[in-house]
Image: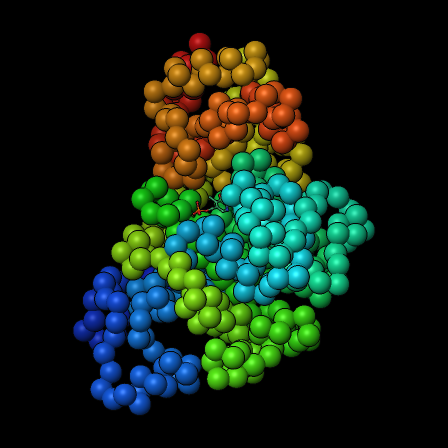
Amino acid sequence: MNRKQKLSTICVQGGWKPKNGEPRVLPIYQSTTFKYETSEQMARLFDLEESGYFYTRLQNPTNDAVASKIAELEGGVAAMLTSSGQAANFYACFNICEAGDHIVSATSIYGGTYNLLSVTFKKFGIECTFVDQEASEEEISKAFRPNTKLLFGEMLSNPGVMVLDVEKFARIAHNHGVPLIVDNTFATPINCRPFEWGADIVTHSTTKYMDGHATCVGGCIVDSGNFDWEAYADKYPGLCLPDESYHGLVYTKAFGKMAYITKATSQLMRDLGAIQSPENAFLLNLGLETLHLRMPRHCQNALRVAEWLESNEKVAWVSYPGLKNDKCHELAEKYLPNGSCGVLSFGLKGGRDVAIRFMDKLKLVAIVTHVADARTSILHPASHTHRQLSDEQLKEAGIAPDLMRLSVGIEDIDDIIADIKQALE
Ligand SMILES: *Cc1c(COP(=O)(O)O)cnc(C)c1O
């Protein structure tokens, strides 16, 4: 991939490029509107004949600077910020799907996204078939239909931390003439850039490591600019045929490699409006400035905790791609050679009851729903997010009753392990 600067430099200085006399630090453009001298100038903006700011629901300079930093980090041509990760995945799919269309998705994905694809999209007339991401190409290919518009997967699944075989998924998608959309939330571009392995669109819940301090819910969509929509023009009329709501403008003709993200901004954001506030974008940018320092520490700490747990006799099992005997270790070595993320899962001998007693004894490690921020935290799905289910139903949902999801932070490793040790004792 042709990058001008290294990732660390982009984290710190990407996006906002101040001109002579302008603020060194990205300013918060806390303004809904932007002023023009003539009515004619404003009219050209509304017709997408010129680019410029007029209303923050469509574009805002603070948000654009942060989106462009994330696009640079992922090696894409353009990006758009959204109000949340949920909104990012919704827009990323809905930008190229409509009633009567079909999606193929990996099963091992975030619960909120699973719900979006399986329940909410169905109400829009869009169906989704879920596939086991570890199945063969032939098996996964059987899920495709003539009206399938995209393939979806998570680089590192939440909460199972399974590694996606992106090259395999990209091959399957492209063999069927559809783009691959990859949610890269847990890996972040510091540990993996899915575009380098054939993904076409990348999404993020910036709420997690990108913000990294658990202050702002947010999301982002990045376009690689690589998918040839025109080659499948009949499949993607929204991009390749005239848009009635812009006097017959054709996105692929007018914007080339930027067609997908321009349509997402000028049509979906215009009509649905889930923008990120400029103030949240400012805070997200502060998080991004240290992403390259935090990710290695998250991974280093998580591996140490995973190894420590694995060697403890009270621990029944540990799942973390960094462990040599983990089922995803080989894929992790290929796609995430510098580390995966700070999230791991494990179970204690004695099951559900022991897990609850263990968690209540933790002091430094907090019980919270959030994952992937600077502070170490833990969640027990059987007692929290999935507490209505019996042990039998939990198994069917693929969640062991004793499974605890540990999100390892960037505190001193000795203190994290000491807390887990005292709680186990
Ligand atoms: C949290 C999460 C989401 C949803 O993001 P929100 O910002 O909470 O809306 C989507 N995908 C993954 C992988 C996540 O971890």
In this rendering, does residue 311 appear at all?
Answer: no
Q: Is residue 59 above or below residue 334?
A: below
Instruction: Quadrant for residue 226, please give it.
Output: bottom right
How many numbered circles are shown?
0
Instruction: Quadrant for residue 158, please give it.
Output: top right
Task: Say which residue appears at 18% left-offset and 73% top-offset.
Answer: 21
Residue 249, x across and y down, in percent: 51, 83
Q: Is residue 160 above or below residue 102?
A: above
- Name the colouring of the figure: rainbow
On-image quarter of the N terminus: bottom right
Foreground residue among 95 and 152: 95
Task: Say which residue appears at 44% left-offset and 13% top-offset.
Answer: 357
Residue 26, x across and y down, in percent: 26, 62
Foreground residue among 412 and 39: 39
Q: Is residue 353 above or below residue 54?
A: above
Residue 256 horizontal side relative to residue 265, left or right: right
Residue 283 horizontal side relative to residue 338, left or right: left
Q: Residue furthest top?
A: 425
Residue 22, x across and y down, in percent: 21, 71
Foreground residue among 258 and 98: 98
On-image quarter of the C terminus: top left
Task: Say which residue appears at 46% left-offset and 16% top-offset.
Answer: 356
Residue 253, x across and y down, in percent: 56, 83
Task: Say which residue appears at 52% left-offset and 32% top-offset.
Answer: 344
Q: Residue furthest left?
A: 21
